[in-house]
């Protein structure tokens, strides 16, 4: 994992050793790459999207908008309404599904879809990314 980070929006984050803008590159043992770009602020709305590109094609999900209508004239190409600005507007159904799955797992006494180990692995990656930012070097990840 190799990460770089900056304070481009809020220089006050220096007092708590935090950043508002970062780029992370992960490379798997088999050579697959994962690139994450993140910033805490997008003046045009809550911007979040993902692309998975592989030898068999592309999988993509884009920003949610109040309408998918696009306007094409001699003055505009693809003019749209702004992005939905708040994550709760976008993810209400996701949070509801997550809550329903949680309750269902408790009632049925079945395992949760994600485990404590999954959460610890995510935290481990974040710690390695911060170590990379601070050292300026790529950090080898030991998943065990």
Image (spheres, rainbow, N blue to C red):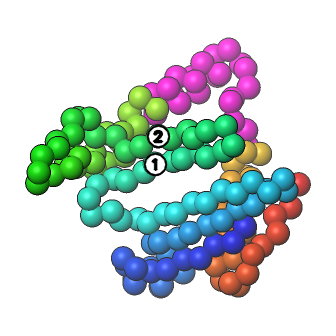
Left or right of residue 26: residue 5 = left
Mark 2 element type: strand
Describe the element under mark 1 as helix, strand or loop: loop
What residue is drawn where x is 28% and y is 55%? 45
Residue at 75% in and 61% down = 27
- Name the residue nearer the viewer: 74 or 28: 74
Q: Residue 124, can we see it?
A: no
Residue 35 drawn at (x, y percent): 61, 60
Give the main secondary structure, helix, strand or loop, of the magenta stretch.
helix
Q: Where is residue 32 in the image (x, y as percent from the top left)?
A: 75, 54
The magenta-colored residue range is: 95-116
Mark 1 and mark 2: Cα distance apart in space: 6 Å
Dividing the image into 4 quarters, which one contains the N terminus? bottom right
Of the numbered discs in the image, which one, if any, rests on residue 49? 1
Residue 71's spot in the image, x, y percent? 16, 42
Q: Is residue 109 magenta?
A: yes
Q: Residue at x 21, y 35 (%)?
A: 69
Camera-side residue of 133 and 14: 133
- The residue positioned farthest toward the front in the image shown: 74
Q: Do the residues labelled 1 and 2 touch (CB within 8 Å)?
A: yes
Quadrant position of the C terminus in the picture = bottom right
Decide: few, some or many residues near mark 1? Use Cα within 10 Å; few <14, some 14-19, many ≥20: few
Looking at the picture, does residue 71 appear above or below residue 126?
above
**Residue 61 circle label:** 2
């Amino acid at each position: 994992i190799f990460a770089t980070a900056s304070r481009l929006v809020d220089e006050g984050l220096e007092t708590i050793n935090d950043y508002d803008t970062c780029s992370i590159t992960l490379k798997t043992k088999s050579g697959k790459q994962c690139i994450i770009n993140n910033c805490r602020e997008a003046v045009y709305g809550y911007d979040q999207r993902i692309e998975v590109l592989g030898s068999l094609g592309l999988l993509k999900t884009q920003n949610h908008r109040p309408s998918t209508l696009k306007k094409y004239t001699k003055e505009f190409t693809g003019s749209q309404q702004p992005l939905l600005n708040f994550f709760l507007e976008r993810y209400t159904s996701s949070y509801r599904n997550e809550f329903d799955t949680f309750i269902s797992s408790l009632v049925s006494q079945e395992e949760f879809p994600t485990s404590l180990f999954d959460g610890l692995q995510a935290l481990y990656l974040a710690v390695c990314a911060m170590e990379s930012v601070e050292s300026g070097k790529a950090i080898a990840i030991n998943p065990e």
